[in-house]
Amino acid sequence: MFQNERYAKIYEILQQRGSVTVQYLEKQLYVSEATIRRDLDALEKSGLLQRVWGGAMLHTVDKDIPSFVRLKSNQDKKEKIASVASLFLKSSTSIFFDSSTSCLPLVPYIAELKNIKVVTSSLKMSLELGQSTDAAVNLLGGAVYEDYILSGHLAVNSVRQYHTDMMFFSCSGISSACGITSIEPKVVEVCQEMMKHTALKILLCDSTKVGKNALLRLADLGEVDYVIMDEIPENDPELVSALGSRLVTERSQIR
Amino acid sequence: MFQNERYAKIYEILQQRGSVTVQYLEKQLYVSEATIRRDLDALEKSGLLQRVWGGAMLHTVDKDIPSFVRLKSNQDKKEKIASVASLFLKSSTSIFFDSSTSCLPLVPYIAELKNIKVVTSSLKMSLELGQSTDAAVNLLGGAVYEDYILSGHLAVNSVRQYHTDMMFFSCSGISSACGITSIEPKVVEVCQEMMKHTALKILLCDSTKVGKNALLRLADLGEVDYVIMDEIPENDPELVSALGSRLVTERSQIR
DNA sequence: CCTCGCGTGATTGAATTTGATTATATTATA
DNA sequence: TATAATATAATCAAATTCAATCACGCGAGG
Protein backbone atom coordinates (compact mmCIF):
# COMPACT_ATOMS: atom_id res chain seq x y z
CA MET A 1 0.00 0.00 0.00
CA PHE A 2 1.37 3.35 -1.04
CA GLN A 3 1.72 6.40 1.09
CA ASN A 4 -1.05 8.10 -0.76
CA GLU A 5 -3.36 5.18 -0.36
CA ARG A 6 -2.61 5.14 3.33
CA TYR A 7 -3.38 8.84 3.57
CA ALA A 8 -6.65 8.26 1.78
CA LYS A 9 -7.50 5.33 4.00
CA ILE A 10 -6.78 7.28 7.14
CA TYR A 11 -8.95 10.10 5.96
CA GLU A 12 -11.71 7.69 5.03
CA ILE A 13 -11.63 6.05 8.44
CA LEU A 14 -11.63 9.43 10.05
CA GLN A 15 -14.70 10.47 8.13
CA GLN A 16 -16.52 7.38 9.26
CA ARG A 17 -15.56 7.57 12.88
CA GLY A 18 -14.81 11.22 13.50
CA SER A 19 -11.68 10.36 15.45
CA VAL A 20 -9.11 7.58 15.64
CA THR A 21 -6.29 6.45 17.86
CA VAL A 22 -2.79 5.81 16.58
CA GLN A 23 -3.10 2.23 17.79
CA TYR A 24 -6.24 1.60 15.79
CA LEU A 25 -4.67 2.88 12.59
CA GLU A 26 -1.56 0.82 13.29
CA LYS A 27 -3.52 -2.43 13.32
CA GLN A 28 -5.82 -1.39 10.54
CA LEU A 29 -3.07 -0.45 8.12
CA TYR A 30 -0.38 -2.91 9.19
CA VAL A 31 2.35 -0.35 9.59
CA SER A 32 4.38 0.81 12.53
CA GLU A 33 3.43 3.39 15.06
CA ALA A 34 6.12 5.73 13.77
CA THR A 35 4.71 5.64 10.28
CA ILE A 36 1.22 6.41 11.48
CA ARG A 37 2.55 9.35 13.42
CA ARG A 38 4.39 10.65 10.40
CA ASP A 39 1.29 10.23 8.28
CA LEU A 40 -0.85 12.10 10.77
CA ASP A 41 1.71 14.87 10.96
CA ALA A 42 1.69 15.20 7.20
CA LEU A 43 -2.09 15.20 7.02
CA GLU A 44 -2.30 17.76 9.75
CA LYS A 45 0.15 19.93 7.90
CA SER A 46 -2.17 19.85 4.93
CA GLY A 47 -5.00 20.88 7.19
CA LEU A 48 -7.06 17.74 6.76
CA LEU A 49 -7.19 16.65 10.32
CA GLN A 50 -6.23 17.67 13.74
CA ARG A 51 -3.69 15.89 15.89
CA VAL A 52 -4.88 15.17 19.40
CA TRP A 53 -3.31 13.22 22.22
CA GLY A 54 -3.32 9.57 21.23
CA GLY A 55 -4.65 10.00 17.76
CA ALA A 56 -6.40 12.46 15.48
CA MET A 57 -9.76 14.02 14.83
CA LEU A 58 -11.41 15.59 11.88
CA HIS A 59 -10.53 19.20 11.58
CA THR A 60 -13.11 21.09 13.57
CA VAL A 61 -13.58 24.76 13.07
CA ASP A 62 -13.96 25.26 16.79
CA LYS A 63 -10.24 24.87 17.17
CA ASP A 64 -9.64 27.72 14.79
CA ILE A 65 -11.88 29.99 16.70
CA PRO A 66 -10.84 30.08 20.33
CA SER A 67 -13.05 33.04 21.16
CA PHE A 68 -16.10 30.86 20.85
CA VAL A 69 -15.46 29.12 24.12
CA ARG A 70 -18.18 31.16 25.66
CA LEU A 71 -20.54 29.22 23.47
CA LYS A 72 -20.57 26.69 26.28
CA SER A 73 -22.17 29.12 28.68
CA ASN A 74 -25.91 28.80 28.54
CA GLN A 75 -25.46 26.09 25.95
CA ASP A 76 -28.46 24.16 27.26
CA LYS A 77 -30.70 27.16 27.04
CA LYS A 78 -29.49 27.92 23.56
CA GLU A 79 -30.21 24.44 22.38
CA LYS A 80 -33.64 24.53 23.91
CA ILE A 81 -34.27 27.81 22.17
CA ALA A 82 -33.03 26.39 18.89
CA SER A 83 -35.38 23.43 19.11
CA VAL A 84 -38.28 25.83 19.48
CA ALA A 85 -36.97 28.10 16.74
CA SER A 86 -36.70 25.13 14.40
CA LEU A 87 -40.49 24.99 14.31
CA PHE A 88 -40.41 28.21 12.31
CA LEU A 89 -38.12 26.69 9.68
CA LYS A 90 -39.32 25.08 6.52
CA SER A 91 -37.85 24.09 3.19
CA SER A 92 -37.34 26.57 0.37
CA THR A 93 -36.89 29.66 2.49
CA SER A 94 -34.23 32.29 2.71
CA ILE A 95 -32.82 33.26 6.08
CA PHE A 96 -30.64 35.94 7.66
CA PHE A 97 -28.55 34.86 10.62
CA ASP A 98 -26.75 37.45 12.67
CA SER A 99 -23.37 36.71 14.19
CA SER A 100 -24.54 35.64 17.62
CA THR A 101 -23.70 32.25 18.99
CA SER A 102 -27.39 31.65 19.64
CA CYS A 103 -27.95 30.89 15.99
CA LEU A 104 -25.41 28.08 15.79
CA PRO A 105 -27.55 25.35 17.38
CA LEU A 106 -29.98 25.82 14.51
CA VAL A 107 -27.55 24.26 12.07
CA PRO A 108 -28.65 20.63 12.61
CA TYR A 109 -32.23 21.63 11.89
CA ILE A 110 -31.19 23.40 8.71
CA ALA A 111 -29.45 20.22 7.65
CA GLU A 112 -32.77 18.41 7.50
CA LEU A 113 -34.34 20.86 5.08
CA LYS A 114 -34.00 21.34 1.36
CA ASN A 115 -33.40 24.39 -0.76
CA ILE A 116 -32.44 26.71 2.04
CA LYS A 117 -30.64 29.95 1.28
CA VAL A 118 -28.74 31.56 4.09
CA VAL A 119 -27.12 34.95 4.43
CA THR A 120 -25.00 35.58 7.48
CA SER A 121 -22.39 37.89 8.94
CA SER A 122 -20.78 35.10 10.93
CA LEU A 123 -17.81 33.14 9.58
CA LYS A 124 -18.43 30.50 12.18
CA MET A 125 -21.99 30.06 11.04
CA SER A 126 -21.03 29.81 7.39
CA LEU A 127 -18.39 27.21 8.16
CA GLU A 128 -20.80 25.10 10.19
CA LEU A 129 -23.45 25.33 7.52
CA GLY A 130 -21.01 24.48 4.76
CA GLN A 131 -19.77 21.51 6.70
CA SER A 132 -23.01 19.86 7.66
CA THR A 133 -25.78 21.15 5.43
CA ASP A 134 -26.39 21.59 1.74
CA ALA A 135 -27.83 25.04 2.15
CA ALA A 136 -26.66 27.77 -0.21
CA VAL A 137 -24.59 29.98 2.03
CA ASN A 138 -23.84 33.62 1.41
CA LEU A 139 -21.55 35.76 3.46
CA LEU A 140 -21.74 39.50 3.80
CA GLY A 141 -18.61 41.26 2.65
CA GLY A 142 -16.52 43.68 4.62
CA ALA A 143 -14.18 43.80 7.54
CA VAL A 144 -13.55 40.76 9.70
CA TYR A 145 -13.56 41.56 13.39
CA GLU A 146 -12.63 39.64 16.49
CA ASP A 147 -14.88 36.62 17.02
CA TYR A 148 -14.87 36.32 13.24
CA ILE A 149 -17.86 38.45 12.52
CA LEU A 150 -18.31 40.72 9.53
CA SER A 151 -19.26 44.31 10.09
CA GLY A 152 -18.57 47.90 9.12
CA HIS A 153 -20.09 49.95 6.36
CA LEU A 154 -19.20 47.45 3.67
CA ALA A 155 -21.01 44.69 5.51
CA VAL A 156 -24.02 46.90 6.05
CA ASN A 157 -24.06 47.73 2.36
CA SER A 158 -23.85 44.02 1.54
CA VAL A 159 -27.04 43.39 3.45
CA ARG A 160 -28.88 45.52 0.93
CA GLN A 161 -28.04 43.00 -1.77
CA TYR A 162 -30.46 40.56 -0.20
CA HIS A 163 -34.04 40.16 0.90
CA THR A 164 -34.99 37.14 2.96
CA ASP A 165 -38.09 35.43 4.26
CA MET A 166 -36.96 35.39 7.86
CA MET A 167 -34.20 36.46 10.18
CA PHE A 168 -32.80 35.09 13.41
CA PHE A 169 -30.81 37.26 15.76
CA SER A 170 -29.92 37.75 19.37
CA CYS A 171 -29.31 40.51 21.89
CA SER A 172 -27.57 41.34 25.18
CA GLY A 173 -30.63 42.53 27.05
CA ILE A 174 -34.38 42.81 26.77
CA SER A 175 -36.80 44.67 29.01
CA SER A 176 -40.20 46.29 28.94
CA ALA A 177 -38.51 49.57 29.80
CA CYS A 178 -35.78 49.77 27.16
CA GLY A 179 -36.73 47.20 24.55
CA ILE A 180 -34.05 45.10 22.88
CA THR A 181 -30.47 46.19 23.53
CA SER A 182 -26.93 45.09 22.75
CA ILE A 183 -23.39 45.79 23.87
CA GLU A 184 -21.94 45.07 20.43
CA PRO A 185 -21.98 48.00 18.03
CA LYS A 186 -20.65 45.74 15.27
CA VAL A 187 -23.60 43.44 15.65
CA VAL A 188 -26.15 46.21 15.99
CA GLU A 189 -25.37 47.98 12.74
CA VAL A 190 -25.64 44.81 10.70
CA CYS A 191 -28.74 43.57 12.53
CA GLN A 192 -30.60 46.79 12.05
CA GLU A 193 -29.94 46.70 8.34
CA MET A 194 -31.02 43.08 8.14
CA MET A 195 -34.30 43.96 9.82
CA LYS A 196 -35.06 46.32 6.98
CA HIS A 197 -34.67 43.56 4.42
CA THR A 198 -36.52 40.62 5.85
CA ALA A 199 -40.15 39.62 6.26
CA LEU A 200 -40.16 37.81 9.59
CA LYS A 201 -37.95 38.93 12.48
CA ILE A 202 -37.32 36.31 15.15
CA LEU A 203 -35.29 37.12 18.25
CA LEU A 204 -33.50 34.30 20.07
CA CYS A 205 -33.09 35.30 23.69
CA ASP A 206 -32.28 33.23 26.72
CA SER A 207 -34.09 34.13 29.89
CA THR A 208 -31.00 35.41 31.71
CA LYS A 209 -31.10 38.49 29.50
CA VAL A 210 -34.53 39.55 30.58
CA GLY A 211 -34.67 42.78 32.56
CA LYS A 212 -31.15 43.75 31.52
CA ASN A 213 -30.40 46.84 29.50
CA ALA A 214 -27.24 47.21 27.43
CA LEU A 215 -25.77 50.38 26.01
CA LEU A 216 -27.12 50.24 22.49
CA ARG A 217 -30.70 50.09 21.37
CA LEU A 218 -31.05 47.28 18.87
CA ALA A 219 -34.80 47.40 18.30
CA ASP A 220 -38.10 48.19 19.97
CA LEU A 221 -40.25 45.37 21.18
CA GLY A 222 -42.82 46.16 18.51
CA GLU A 223 -40.33 45.62 15.72
CA VAL A 224 -39.89 41.88 16.16
CA ASP A 225 -42.40 39.25 15.12
CA TYR A 226 -41.41 36.59 17.62
CA VAL A 227 -39.21 36.34 20.68
CA ILE A 228 -38.08 32.81 21.50
CA MET A 229 -36.94 32.07 25.05
CA ASP A 230 -36.05 28.93 26.94
CA GLU A 231 -38.65 29.71 29.60
CA ILE A 232 -41.17 32.34 30.54
CA PRO A 233 -39.25 34.99 32.50
CA GLU A 234 -40.51 35.92 35.92
CA ASN A 235 -38.62 39.10 36.63
CA ASP A 236 -40.35 41.33 34.08
CA PRO A 237 -44.06 40.56 33.86
CA GLU A 238 -44.67 43.72 31.88
CA LEU A 239 -42.40 42.38 29.15
CA VAL A 240 -44.35 39.17 28.99
CA SER A 241 -47.63 40.94 28.63
CA ALA A 242 -46.21 43.41 26.13
CA LEU A 243 -45.04 40.58 23.92
CA GLY A 244 -48.19 38.58 24.39
CA SER A 245 -48.46 35.70 21.96
CA ARG A 246 -45.26 36.80 20.23
CA LEU A 247 -43.31 35.33 23.14
CA VAL A 248 -42.65 31.70 22.33
CA THR A 249 -41.22 29.00 24.59
CA GLU A 250 -41.13 25.25 24.68
CA ARG A 251 -44.65 25.04 26.05
CA SER A 252 -46.24 27.46 23.66
CA GLN A 253 -48.56 26.22 21.02
CA ILE A 254 -47.36 27.25 17.64
CA ARG A 255 -50.04 27.18 15.08
CA MET B 1 6.55 -5.96 -27.38
CA PHE B 2 6.71 -2.40 -28.53
CA GLN B 3 6.69 0.68 -26.40
CA ASN B 4 3.13 1.57 -27.31
CA GLU B 5 1.88 -1.88 -26.47
CA ARG B 6 3.55 -1.64 -23.11
CA TYR B 7 2.04 1.75 -22.43
CA ALA B 8 -1.39 0.39 -23.24
CA LYS B 9 -0.84 -2.65 -21.10
CA ILE B 10 0.28 -0.58 -18.13
CA TYR B 11 -2.72 1.66 -18.43
CA GLU B 12 -4.99 -1.36 -18.71
CA ILE B 13 -3.54 -2.90 -15.56
CA LEU B 14 -3.84 0.38 -13.78
CA GLN B 15 -7.50 0.66 -14.64
CA GLN B 16 -8.14 -2.78 -13.27
CA ARG B 17 -6.23 -2.34 -10.04
CA GLY B 18 -6.21 1.38 -9.41
CA SER B 19 -2.56 1.29 -8.46
CA VAL B 20 0.54 -0.74 -9.27
CA THR B 21 4.07 -1.10 -8.04
CA VAL B 22 7.06 -0.88 -10.30
CA GLN B 23 7.98 -4.42 -9.26
CA TYR B 24 4.65 -5.82 -10.32
CA LEU B 25 4.86 -4.26 -13.75
CA GLU B 26 8.42 -5.51 -14.10
CA LYS B 27 7.37 -9.12 -13.68
CA GLN B 28 4.16 -8.71 -15.61
CA LEU B 29 5.79 -7.21 -18.69
CA TYR B 30 9.17 -8.95 -18.57
CA VAL B 31 11.18 -5.78 -18.84
CA SER B 32 13.67 -4.10 -16.56
CA GLU B 33 12.95 -1.76 -13.71
CA ALA B 34 14.50 1.12 -15.59
CA THR B 35 12.17 0.65 -18.52
CA ILE B 36 9.12 0.58 -16.33
CA ARG B 37 10.23 3.80 -14.70
CA ARG B 38 10.74 5.44 -18.04
CA ASP B 39 7.31 4.26 -19.14
CA LEU B 40 5.65 5.57 -16.04
CA ASP B 41 7.42 8.89 -16.42
CA ALA B 42 6.17 9.17 -19.97
CA LEU B 43 2.63 8.21 -19.06
CA GLU B 44 2.60 10.66 -16.22
CA LYS B 45 3.75 13.41 -18.53
CA SER B 46 0.77 12.76 -20.78
CA GLY B 47 -1.46 12.88 -17.75
CA LEU B 48 -2.67 9.29 -17.79
CA LEU B 49 -1.46 8.38 -14.35
CA GLN B 50 0.21 9.71 -11.28
CA ARG B 51 3.62 8.66 -10.09
CA VAL B 52 3.86 7.80 -6.43
CA TRP B 53 6.66 6.35 -4.36
CA GLY B 54 7.05 2.75 -5.42
CA GLY B 55 4.70 2.79 -8.34
CA ALA B 56 1.82 4.69 -9.85
CA MET B 57 -1.85 5.40 -9.28
CA LEU B 58 -4.72 6.49 -11.44
CA HIS B 59 -5.55 10.14 -11.15
CA THR B 60 -9.08 9.29 -10.19
CA VAL B 61 -8.12 7.56 -6.99
CA ASP B 62 -7.89 10.77 -5.04
CA LYS B 63 -10.96 12.18 -6.73
CA ASP B 64 -13.21 11.90 -3.72
CA ILE B 65 -10.50 13.16 -1.46
CA PRO B 66 -10.26 16.92 -1.42
CA SER B 67 -7.08 17.53 -3.30
CA PHE B 68 -4.90 16.79 -0.34
CA VAL B 69 -2.40 14.45 -1.88
CA ARG B 70 -1.45 17.20 -4.25
CA LEU B 71 -1.48 19.68 -1.46
CA LYS B 72 0.83 17.62 0.67
CA SER B 73 3.27 16.75 -2.07
CA ASN B 74 3.72 20.37 -2.96
CA GLN B 75 3.67 21.76 0.53
CA ASP B 76 7.42 22.18 0.65
CA LYS B 77 7.40 23.99 -2.65
CA LYS B 78 4.65 26.26 -1.46
CA GLU B 79 6.59 27.16 1.63
CA LYS B 80 9.67 27.83 -0.41
CA ILE B 81 7.64 30.05 -2.71
CA ALA B 82 6.17 31.86 0.26
CA SER B 83 9.60 32.61 1.67
CA VAL B 84 10.57 34.20 -1.63
CA ALA B 85 7.25 36.01 -1.91
CA SER B 86 7.73 37.44 1.56
CA LEU B 87 10.53 39.59 0.16
CA PHE B 88 7.88 41.57 -1.67
CA LEU B 89 5.98 42.33 1.53
CA LYS B 90 6.46 45.40 3.62
CA SER B 91 4.57 47.20 6.32
CA SER B 92 1.67 49.55 5.59
CA THR B 93 0.51 47.93 2.41
CA SER B 94 -2.82 46.57 1.24
CA ILE B 95 -2.99 43.15 -0.31
CA PHE B 96 -5.42 40.96 -2.25
CA PHE B 97 -5.14 37.21 -1.67
CA ASP B 98 -7.03 34.82 -3.88
CA SER B 99 -8.47 31.61 -2.48
CA SER B 100 -5.61 29.31 -3.43
CA THR B 101 -3.78 27.30 -0.84
CA SER B 102 -0.52 28.75 -2.10
CA CYS B 103 -1.22 31.96 -0.26
CA LEU B 104 -1.60 30.38 3.16
CA PRO B 105 2.12 29.93 3.93
CA LEU B 106 2.47 33.70 3.66
CA VAL B 107 0.57 34.21 6.89
CA PRO B 108 3.59 33.93 9.23
CA TYR B 109 5.37 36.62 7.22
CA ILE B 110 2.35 38.90 7.42
CA ALA B 111 2.42 38.44 11.18
CA GLU B 112 5.79 40.17 11.37
CA LEU B 113 4.57 43.32 9.68
CA LYS B 114 2.56 46.25 10.88
CA ASN B 115 -0.45 48.06 9.45
CA ILE B 116 -1.30 45.48 6.81
CA LYS B 117 -4.69 45.52 5.16
CA VAL B 118 -5.83 42.33 3.52
CA VAL B 119 -8.74 41.55 1.23
CA THR B 120 -9.40 37.93 0.39
CA SER B 121 -11.98 35.55 -1.02
CA SER B 122 -10.83 32.70 1.18
CA LEU B 123 -12.48 31.98 4.52
CA LYS B 124 -9.52 29.83 5.45
CA MET B 125 -7.13 32.68 4.80
CA SER B 126 -9.17 35.14 6.81
CA LEU B 127 -9.33 32.75 9.74
CA GLU B 128 -5.59 32.17 9.70
CA LEU B 129 -4.86 35.85 9.46
CA GLY B 130 -7.29 36.68 12.22
CA GLN B 131 -5.74 34.08 14.42
CA SER B 132 -2.08 34.86 14.11
CA THR B 133 -1.69 38.38 12.79
CA ASP B 134 -2.99 41.82 13.62
CA ALA B 135 -3.68 42.68 10.01
CA ALA B 136 -7.00 44.30 9.14
CA VAL B 137 -8.82 41.58 7.28
CA ASN B 138 -11.63 42.13 4.82
CA LEU B 139 -13.65 39.39 3.18
CA LEU B 140 -15.41 39.65 -0.13
CA GLY B 141 -19.14 39.08 0.13
CA GLY B 142 -21.21 36.60 -1.80
CA ALA B 143 -21.77 32.91 -2.08
CA VAL B 144 -19.68 30.44 -0.12
CA TYR B 145 -18.58 27.46 -2.18
CA GLU B 146 -16.94 24.18 -1.37
CA ASP B 147 -13.44 24.59 0.04
CA TYR B 148 -14.80 27.72 1.68
CA ILE B 149 -14.11 30.17 -1.06
CA LEU B 150 -16.26 33.15 -1.96
CA SER B 151 -17.30 33.64 -5.54
CA GLY B 152 -20.16 34.48 -7.85
CA HIS B 153 -21.29 37.87 -9.09
CA LEU B 154 -21.69 39.31 -5.62
CA ALA B 155 -18.11 38.45 -4.77
CA VAL B 156 -16.90 39.92 -8.03
CA ASN B 157 -18.83 43.09 -7.30
CA SER B 158 -17.31 43.22 -3.83
CA VAL B 159 -13.83 43.33 -5.33
CA ARG B 160 -14.69 46.68 -6.89
CA GLN B 161 -15.02 48.16 -3.42
CA TYR B 162 -11.28 47.90 -2.97
CA HIS B 163 -8.00 48.91 -4.49
CA THR B 164 -4.82 47.36 -3.18
CA ASP B 165 -1.09 47.81 -3.53
CA MET B 166 -0.43 44.22 -4.43
CA MET B 167 -2.08 40.90 -5.13
CA PHE B 168 -1.02 37.30 -4.68
CA PHE B 169 -2.70 34.52 -6.59
CA SER B 170 -2.11 31.10 -8.05
CA CYS B 171 -3.04 29.01 -11.07
CA SER B 172 -3.40 25.45 -12.36
CA GLY B 173 -1.08 25.72 -15.31
CA ILE B 174 1.37 28.08 -16.95
CA SER B 175 3.05 27.78 -20.34
CA SER B 176 4.60 29.90 -23.02
CA ALA B 177 1.92 28.65 -25.37
CA CYS B 178 -1.26 29.34 -23.41
CA GLY B 179 -0.23 31.72 -20.65
CA ILE B 180 -1.69 31.36 -17.18
CA THR B 181 -4.63 28.96 -16.89
CA SER B 182 -6.92 27.52 -14.24
CA ILE B 183 -9.42 24.74 -13.82
CA GLU B 184 -11.52 26.66 -11.32
CA PRO B 185 -14.08 29.03 -12.80
CA LYS B 186 -14.95 30.28 -9.33
CA VAL B 187 -11.38 31.33 -8.74
CA VAL B 188 -10.92 32.79 -12.19
CA GLU B 189 -13.78 35.26 -12.07
CA VAL B 190 -12.67 36.71 -8.76
CA CYS B 191 -8.99 36.76 -9.70
CA GLN B 192 -9.59 38.59 -12.94
CA GLU B 193 -11.54 41.27 -11.15
CA MET B 194 -8.84 41.59 -8.51
CA MET B 195 -6.26 42.11 -11.21
CA LYS B 196 -8.14 45.19 -12.36
CA HIS B 197 -7.96 46.75 -8.92
CA THR B 198 -4.41 46.24 -7.80
CA ALA B 199 -1.08 47.79 -8.58
CA LEU B 200 1.30 44.83 -8.40
CA LYS B 201 0.27 41.38 -9.58
CA ILE B 202 2.32 38.50 -8.20
CA LEU B 203 1.69 34.93 -9.28
CA LEU B 204 2.68 32.10 -6.94
CA CYS B 205 3.31 29.02 -9.01
CA ASP B 206 5.08 25.81 -8.16
CA SER B 207 7.21 24.33 -10.87
CA THR B 208 5.01 21.28 -11.39
CA LYS B 209 2.48 23.51 -13.11
CA VAL B 210 4.85 24.62 -15.81
CA GLY B 211 3.99 23.38 -19.28
CA LYS B 212 0.48 22.43 -18.26
CA ASN B 213 -2.58 24.06 -19.73
CA ALA B 214 -5.92 24.07 -17.95
CA LEU B 215 -9.29 24.82 -19.44
CA LEU B 216 -9.70 28.46 -18.49
CA ARG B 217 -7.48 31.37 -19.37
CA LEU B 218 -6.71 33.27 -16.20
CA ALA B 219 -4.29 35.82 -17.59
CA ASP B 220 -1.65 36.37 -20.22
CA LEU B 221 1.97 36.21 -19.24
CA GLY B 222 2.29 39.92 -19.87
CA GLU B 223 -0.35 40.79 -17.33
CA VAL B 224 1.57 39.76 -14.23
CA ASP B 225 4.41 41.70 -12.69
CA TYR B 226 6.18 38.77 -11.05
CA VAL B 227 5.98 35.01 -11.16
CA ILE B 228 7.42 33.31 -8.11
CA MET B 229 8.44 29.66 -8.43
CA ASP B 230 10.27 27.23 -6.23
CA GLU B 231 12.83 26.59 -8.95
CA ILE B 232 13.61 27.49 -12.53
CA PRO B 233 11.53 25.14 -14.69
CA GLU B 234 13.34 23.15 -17.32
CA ASN B 235 10.54 21.86 -19.46
CA ASP B 236 9.51 25.17 -20.98
CA PRO B 237 12.57 27.30 -21.75
CA GLU B 238 10.46 29.65 -23.82
CA LEU B 239 8.42 30.48 -20.75
CA VAL B 240 11.56 31.30 -18.82
CA SER B 241 12.83 33.66 -21.46
CA ALA B 242 9.40 35.21 -21.95
CA LEU B 243 9.19 36.03 -18.26
CA GLY B 244 12.80 37.17 -18.06
CA SER B 245 13.57 38.98 -14.85
CA ARG B 246 9.92 38.77 -13.82
CA LEU B 247 10.51 35.12 -12.94
CA VAL B 248 11.70 35.01 -9.36
CA THR B 249 13.09 32.05 -7.44
CA GLU B 250 15.12 31.48 -4.34
CA ARG B 251 18.34 32.23 -6.14
CA SER B 252 17.20 35.37 -7.86
CA GLN B 253 18.57 38.69 -6.75
CA ILE B 254 15.72 40.97 -5.85
CA ARG B 255 16.64 44.58 -5.88
C1' DC C 1 31.24 -1.78 -43.30
C1' DC C 2 30.56 1.94 -40.41
C1' DT C 3 27.93 5.15 -37.71
C1' DC C 4 24.14 7.27 -35.81
C1' DG C 5 19.81 7.13 -33.24
C1' DC C 6 16.88 4.78 -30.33
C1' DG C 7 15.34 1.82 -26.85
C1' DT C 8 16.84 -1.12 -23.36
C1' DG C 9 19.42 -3.21 -19.38
C1' DA C 10 22.74 -2.70 -15.72
C1' DT C 11 25.26 -0.16 -12.24
C1' DT C 12 25.90 3.18 -8.84
C1' DG C 13 25.30 6.66 -5.39
C1' DA C 14 21.72 9.49 -3.50
C1' DA C 15 17.18 10.03 -1.65
C1' DT C 16 13.08 8.34 0.59
C1' DT C 17 10.53 5.57 3.51
C1' DT C 18 10.15 2.75 7.27
C1' DG C 19 10.58 0.35 11.85
C1' DA C 20 13.18 0.20 16.09
C1' DT C 21 15.12 2.50 19.97
C1' DT C 22 15.62 5.88 23.36
C1' DA C 23 14.81 9.89 26.02
C1' DT C 24 11.27 13.24 26.99
C1' DA C 25 6.59 14.87 27.76
C1' DT C 26 1.89 14.16 29.00
C1' DT C 27 -1.91 11.92 31.14
C1' DA C 28 -3.92 8.79 34.40
C1' DT C 29 -3.83 6.55 38.85
C1' DA C 30 -2.91 5.66 43.57
C1' DT D 1 1.73 14.75 45.21
C1' DA D 2 4.27 10.88 43.61
C1' DT D 3 4.29 7.19 40.52
C1' DA D 4 3.01 4.37 36.73
C1' DA D 5 1.33 4.11 32.14
C1' DT D 6 1.15 5.91 27.90
C1' DA D 7 2.16 9.06 23.98
C1' DT D 8 5.47 11.69 21.73
C1' DA D 9 9.69 13.49 19.30
C1' DA D 10 14.23 12.62 17.85
C1' DT D 11 17.55 9.69 16.10
C1' DC D 12 19.49 5.74 13.78
C1' DA D 13 19.98 1.88 10.67
C1' DA D 14 18.08 -1.00 7.16
C1' DA D 15 15.47 -1.64 3.17
C1' DT D 16 13.65 0.11 -0.75
C1' DT D 17 13.24 3.26 -4.50
C1' DC D 18 14.94 6.74 -7.44
C1' DA D 19 17.70 9.37 -10.98
C1' DA D 20 21.69 9.56 -13.61
C1' DT D 21 24.90 7.39 -16.29
C1' DC D 22 27.10 4.13 -19.19
C1' DA D 23 27.13 0.25 -22.27
C1' DC D 24 24.96 -2.90 -25.35
C1' DG D 25 22.12 -4.42 -29.34
C1' DC D 26 19.54 -3.52 -33.29
C1' DG D 27 17.98 -1.43 -37.48
C1' DA D 28 18.23 2.50 -40.92
C1' DG D 29 20.85 4.95 -43.88
C1' DG D 30 25.21 6.57 -45.76
Image (tube, coloured by chain):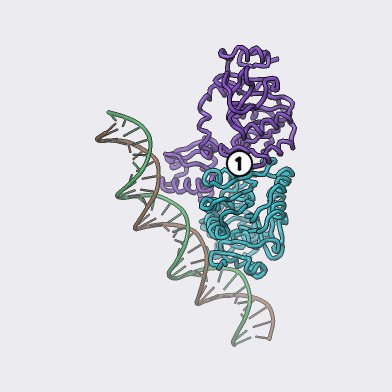
Chain colours: A purple, B cyan, C green, D brown
Query: How many marks on residues?
Result: 1
Q: Is residue C7 above or below residue A224?
A: below
Choose between B23 and A1: the one closer to the eye.
Answer: A1
Image location of residue A155, percent across then percent down: 67, 39
Q: Is residue B24 visible?
A: no
Q: Is residue B144 visible?
A: yes
Q: Which residue is mark 1?
A: A144
Image location of residue A97, percent across then percent down: 65, 31
Asked where in the image residue B141 lies, by quadrant, the reply is top right
Image location of residue B190, percent across then percent down: 70, 49
Q: Residues within 10 Å of mark 1 (few under 14, many from 20)?
A: many
Asked where in the image residue A236 lies, by quadrant, the reply is top right
Residue plotted at (64% across, 31% down): A188
Left or right of B216, for residue B87: left
Residue plotted at (71% across, 39% down): A157
Chain letter behind tag 1: A
Choose between A56 and C3: the one closer to the eye.
Answer: A56
What's under tag 1, amino acid-wise?
Val
SS under mark 1: strand
Residue plotted at (41% across, 48% down): A34
Image quarter (top left, top right, bottom left or bottom right) of the C terminus of chain B:
bottom right
Image quarter (top left, top right, bottom left or bottom right) of the N terminus of chain B:
bottom right
Asked where in the image residue B55 lies, by quadrant, the reply is bottom right
Image location of residue A190, percent across then percent down: 66, 34
